Image (tube, rainbow, N blue to C red):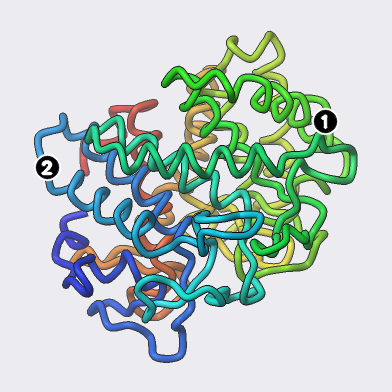
Amino acid sequence: MNFYQQCPAEHGYPRFVLATFLDGDWTPMPDRTDTIPSTQNGMGILSHLKFHELRGKQDPRFVRTARAMGDYLVQEALTPNSGQYPAFTRSTGKRDQFPLAADCGSQSDRPYEVEPDKGGIAGYSLLLLFEATGERKYLEQGLHNARILVANQKSGDASHSPWPFRVDYRNGDGRGPVSGNMTYILRLYDALLAQGYEEFSAPCESLWKWIKHYQIPNAAADGSLFAQFFEDHDTPTNRTAWAPLNLARYLLEKKTALGPDWCADCAALLEFVRATFTHQEFGVTVCHEQDEDKQAWGGINSTYGAVLALYAKDIGSSTLADEARQALNFTLYSIDELGRPRDLFKNPGPGGWQEDAHTDVIHNYVDALRAFPDWGEFG
């Protein structure tokens, strides 16, 4: 975290806020101008706010960094204010555009496409940033994202999530019937209900009904309702570990507020991930991202370690706690003596995907340390 405080500024933002691919010296990779603003900065806001809390809210640098990420999302990363998803947070873009152009879609997004679930990630993180800073612009963008999501929400069924994975923001045409990550839209609705916006009560109930009655049971079947999360893939049947793990984390946080089945549901999600997405490296059980990528990237493997730690704590399993700690230690070996992380242990040098090196990593260690404070005694 201290290393990332040294990042040079560009266009008023730390460079890792606007660029997804950097080397260990903060130099953008010339052949990778594509970016993933919502996931990278949304999860980064969560990481920096959680780390700020872990350190007793004594160091304002981490809130300043979170605000820089939020400012980028609000000021630079929106669709045009027209169409079916107006002024909605972009899922992909290009690092050299301020603000992002109307046709900036990159990776596996087409030029005018957005991913609704990424608007949920961005909106929820902006709500937390509003709570931390009191700045209404963050609340207003999160509220706007939520209202756009409600306007386009369907009931969902056994082969369709309530939103498609991708949509053309101009006309709402969808691509990909299943979007596996519904958790952060649910979190966004929850956060707005906590702020007194009762208009989200019915949409929240409808979304939870789909998750509870279709998606969670599907973990014990073929897992097809956990397909599609990552911006650089568009195979409609490509299942990911990210979506069930983040849903399991939500269940572990809410517990009995969701009903008596929360623990059994969480167990089903983790059993699906363990059976489908884990493998051994150097004798350590690690987690890979998706059907189409079987590597233990920093984001997904730290997510696995954190969620497994939370579950192990709740059920009192020392065996699962040990496995969680080993997975987290595995990703720590990607950090060199200067504090520079690699996105993937196998990669030869520091840097790479910034969410796998940093922004979708730190919050996972905070969750694990909250569950097992003694794990931080030597670090």
Toward the bottom, the furthest residue is 30
- Residue 37's spot in the image, x, y percent? 44, 62
- Residue 242's spot in the image, x, y percent? 60, 49
In the figure, 342 relative to 58: above or below?
below
Give the residue type at disc 2.
Pro
Side of 340 relative to 265 (left or right): left
Give the residue type at disc 1.
Pro
Q: Mark 1 vs mark 2: which is more N-terminal?
A: 2
User: The C terminus appears in which quarter of the rendering?
Assistant: top left
Image depth: mark 1 or mark 2 in front? 2
- Residue 123's spot in the image, x, y percent? 47, 43
- Number of marks: 2
For label 2, the residue is 60
Q: Is residue 202 visible?
A: yes
In the figure, 89 relative to 309: above or below?
below
Which secondary structure lies at badge 2? loop
For label 1, the residue is 217
Residue 362 disc label = none
Side of 300 relative to 268 (left or right): left
